[in-house]
Amino acid sequence: MEKGFDTEKYLKEQTKAILDRVSKFDKKLYLEFGGKLCYDGHASRVLPGYDKETKVRLLKNLKDIEIVYCISAKDIQNGRIRNDFGLRYDDQAVKDIEDLREHGLNVSAVVINLFEDEPAAIKFKKRLENMGTSVYIHYMIKGYTNNFKLVVSDEGYGKQEYVKTEKPIIIITGTGGGSGKMSFCLSQIYHEQKKRVNSGFAKFETFPIWDLPLDHPVNVAYEAATADQGDINMIDPFYLKKYNKIAVNYNRDIENFSIMQRIINSFPMKDSFISTYNSPTEMGVNRISSGITNDVVVREASKQEVIRRYFWYRQQRIYGIVDQNTTDRVKVLMRKLDVAINDRKVVESARKAAFDAAKEKKGNKNIYCGAAIQLDDKRIITGKNSPLMHAESAAILNAIKELANVPDNIDLLSKEVINHIRFLKKDILNRVSENLNVEETMIALAISSATNPMAAHAV
C-alpha cells in the first residue's frame, strides 16, 4: 500500500499543539475528543499510513492525563445503537472503558448527562458502579440555549455534580454526538472559576481538516461518514470575519458557537484564555494535516472511501437502520468528486463473480453472490458463495492462498471441520443457513492448521 501519511511526524506536532494549549491555563485543560479513541478505521482508510491506534499513542505521549467518559441518559433510555459495531450505547460505553483499560488508560469517571430520572440510566449507573467505576449524574438544564443567566449560575452549572480531577489534561470522550461532553466541560470550568482556578477547554476533532479546502476529498469523505447524521462541512464564518481566512468546520459546531460564546462571556473570570476564542475553529487543536506526505494518495483513498460508504449505507438502508436520504446524500458527494461505483475496482469483479456463479449454478439455495479483494499489488481475488461458505469467506481464503503461494487445487480447510460446523449450525442451533461466514471460516482455518501443514503455512 502506498502511504500518504506519516504518523510519527503527526504525533510530534499534535502533542506539541495540545501541550501548548495546556500552557494557556492553570495547568488544567478539558480536551473534548471526537470520534473513536481506540480504533479509528475511517482515518486509516482516508489517510493511508495512519496508525489505527494513533489516538491511544497520542494519549500515552501526553502522559499526565485522566479520562472522563460521557453518555446521554436519553440515549441509554432509548436504546440507541452504534452503527459501526451494532452495540447499544450503554454496551458500547462498557466496551470502550474496557478497551481503554487494556491499553493502560484508566477511565476515572463516567458522567451520565441530560438526566431526568430515566429508569434505564439508573440501572446503567448501578451496572458501572458494580464494575468499580465512579459515576456522576448531570441533570437536564431547562432553557439551556436561551436562559444564559440561569445556565451560568448555581442553579445551572453550579447545581451539577462536580467531578474531582487531579491531572492537568482531562480527556473527555463518549459514545457519540449528543452525549453532553461540552456541557460537562463548561460545568467543570464554572465550578473551578468560582474557586479562581483558570481551567480551560479545547476540542480535538480529526475531521473535517480545518486547514484543507472545503471540497478536498478527505473532507468530503467525512461528510460521507456522517451522512446518517446529516453533518455538513462549511466555511467557518466567524474565522473568516475575524481573520479574512478560510477555515473548514462542520455545521453543528458553527451553529452552536454563538451560544457557546454567550455562555463563556457569562463566566466569572473574564480574562481566561477561553474568552479569546473567536471561532469554533480556534477551539480546536487539530494538526492532522501536518502528517500528510502525499496529497495524491490521500485524495484517491478518500474518493474510494466515499464509494465504500455508499455501499455501506445501501446495506444499512436494507436493514432499516438509515433512510433513503442518507444514500442520496452520498450520491451527491460522489457526483461532487466525479466518481462512480465502478471506480472502486473490486465492484465490477465482485459483480462478475456473482454473474458467473448464477451462470454456473454454483450459489446456495438459488442465491448467487460474489465478493472481491484487491491486494496491495493491485491483483483482484474473487470468491463465490456456495453451500459451504459465504462469498466473502471464499474470497478471503482465495486471497490467503494467493499470498501464501498455495496451489489452487489444495484445500486449506478440513472437510471434517467444515461439516462439523455446518452440523452445529443447522441441526443444533437451527440456523436457516449452514454455510460458513468469515469469522467461522477463520476459526475453521485455525483448527485445520493443527493437522494440515498447508493451512499452518497459510495462517
Image: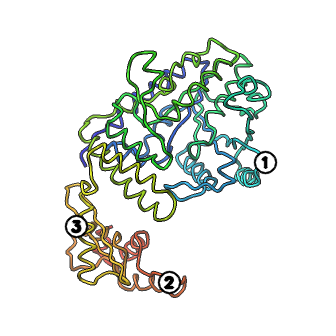
For label 1, the residue is: 117
Expressed as whole percent of the image width and height from the top left, the position of residue 231 reads: 48, 41
For label 2, the residue is: 424
Expressed as whole percent of the image width and height from the top left, the position of residue 280 reads: 51, 26
Expressed as whole percent of the image width and height from the top left, the position of residue 412 reads: 30, 76
For label 3, the residue is: 402
33, above or below 190, in the image: below
Give the structural element (helix, strand or loop) at label 3: helix
Report if the CB atoms under discs 1 and 2 are less than 8 Å apart.
no
Q: Quadrant of residue 81?
A: bottom right
322, above or below 108, in the image: below
Alpha-carbon distance for marks 3 and 2? Answer: 30 Å
Alpha-carbon distance for marks 1 and 3? Answer: 57 Å
Q: Amino acid at mark 2?
A: Leu
Give the structural element (helix, strand or loop) at label 1: loop
Residue at 41% in and 43% down: 223
Alpha-carbon distance for marks 1 and 2? Answer: 45 Å
Q: Nearer the viewer, mark 1 or mark 3?
A: 1
